[in-house]
Image (cartoon, rainbow, N blue to C red):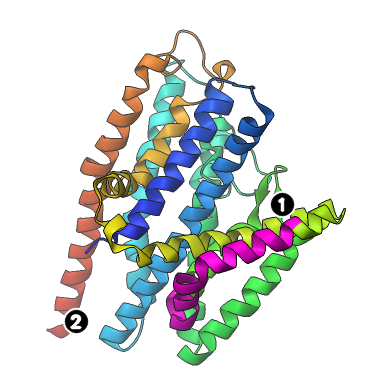
Amino acid sequence: MRDLVLDFWRGIGILMVLAHHLVLFYYGWRGSEFLVDMFERAGPLGVKFFFIVSGYIITRLMLAEEEKRGRLRVGDFYIRRIFRILPPYLLYLFGIFAFSASGWIAVSNADVLTAGAFLCNTALPCGWFVVHTWTLAIEMQFYLLWPVIFIALPARYRAPFLTALLALLFTLSAFGVLVERGWIDNALSFACIALGALAAVHPYARAALKDCGFLFIGAVALAVGIVYSAGFADAAKIMYRTATPLLLAALIFSTYRFPRLISSRPFAAVSGIGLVSYSLYLWQQAFVAPAGYYLSPSLLQYVQYVFLMAVFCLFSYYFVEKPFIRLGKKLLQKKELRAKV
C-alpha cells in the first residue's frame, strides 16, 4: 500500500527541482535577490527530500523482508533495484542520445558513458542533459554497500553504526570534503540517505522526529539566528547546511501528525505527482535547459512543447517503470517457488 506522506514529499521534491530549473535556467530569471536565492535553494532542498525518503523506504523494505524471511536476501534486493531503476534510466539515456542524433541537442559519448556508469557525482565529463543523474549515482553507490552492511551487523548495532556514519558525513560536509563540480555535496547527500535509514531502523528516532519535529525546527532556526547575529556568519552557514537534513526529516515525519491534511485533495494531488517523480525527474532535464544548450531548430526548446515533458514522463511511468517493477516481482516469486520445490 502506498504511503501518501512519502509520496507527498516526493511530489514536493520534484516540484522544487522543476521550479529551480525552469526559473533560473530555462527562463534565466534574475529579479528580486530574495526570490532568486529562494529558487536557488529549492533544487538542492528538493533532492534532499528524495534522498531522505529513499533511505527510509528502502531500509523499511529491508527490515520487512528480514522479519518475514528471517534474513535479507541481498541478491533479491539488487534484482528489485535493477528492475526499479534501470529500465526508465536506460530509456532516458536512449532518448537523449536520439535527440542528439536528431540534431536537437549536443550530448557526447563521454556524457552517456559517465551517466550509464552512475558516476555523474564525480569529476568525470557530465553535461547538462545527464548531470542531474548525479542523484541516481549517489543512491546506487549507497545501495551497493548498505545491504551488505545491513546483513553483516546484528540488529542492535545498526542504529549506532548509522549514527556514527552520520557524524562522519556531517563532519566531511562541514569541511567541504567530497564536493564535486562546486555544488555536489556527496557527503551531505549520503548523510540524507543514512538519516532516512536511521529513521527506519530506530523507532525512537522516528517518533522523536514526528512528535518533536516542529520544536526541533524552531530551536535550530533560533540557534542559527543567534550565531549569525553574533557576527559568526560562516559558522551559521555551516550549522544551517549540516542541520538541513535533520530539519527536512523532522518536517517529513511531523506530517504524520495531521491525518486530516493527509486525506485532503490538494495533498492527494501532490502525492500523485510523487508517484511519477522518478520518471519526471529524469525527463524534465531535457526540456528545461538554458536556451544555449539547444541546437536550432529544436522541438525541445519552446515553452509550448513542455507538455512533451509530461508525455515522456507518463509514457516512462506507465509503460516502462511500472511494468518492469511488476516483472521484477514476478521473477522473484518464480525464484521463490522453484526454491520450495
Q: Amino acid at mark 1?
A: Val
At 36% across and 79% down in the image, what residue appears?
Answer: 63
Q: Position of residue 26 (x, y in %)?
A: 53, 22
Foreground tag (1 vs 2): 1
**Residues shaded magenta:** 200-225
Q: Residue furthest top?
A: 297
> Which quadrant would the C terminus be assigned to in this image?
bottom left
Left or right relative to 212: residue 218: right
Q: Quadrant of residue 174?
A: bottom right
Q: Is residue 50 above or below residue 319?
A: below
User: On the image, numbered disc 1 is attached to which residue?
Assistant: 179
SS state under label 2: helix
Q: Residues within 10 Å of mark 2 (few under 14, many from 20)?
A: few
Q: From the viewer's side, name the closer residue of 273 and 74.
A: 273
SS state under label 1: strand
Left or right relative to 307: residue 246: right
Q: Is residue 22 above or below residue 114?
A: above
Q: Residue furthest right?
A: 231
Q: From the viewer's side, name the closer residue of 166 and 245.
A: 245
Q: Is residue 136 magenta?
A: no
Distance between mark 1 and mark 2 Cα atoms: 45 Å
Q: Earlier in the sequence, mark 1 or mark 2?
A: 1
Q: Which mark is residue 131?
A: none
Q: Amino acid at mark 2?
A: Ala
Q: Is residue 205 magenta?
A: yes
User: On the image, numbered disc 2 is attached to which residue?
Assistant: 339
Q: Position of residue 118 (x, y in %)?
A: 52, 50
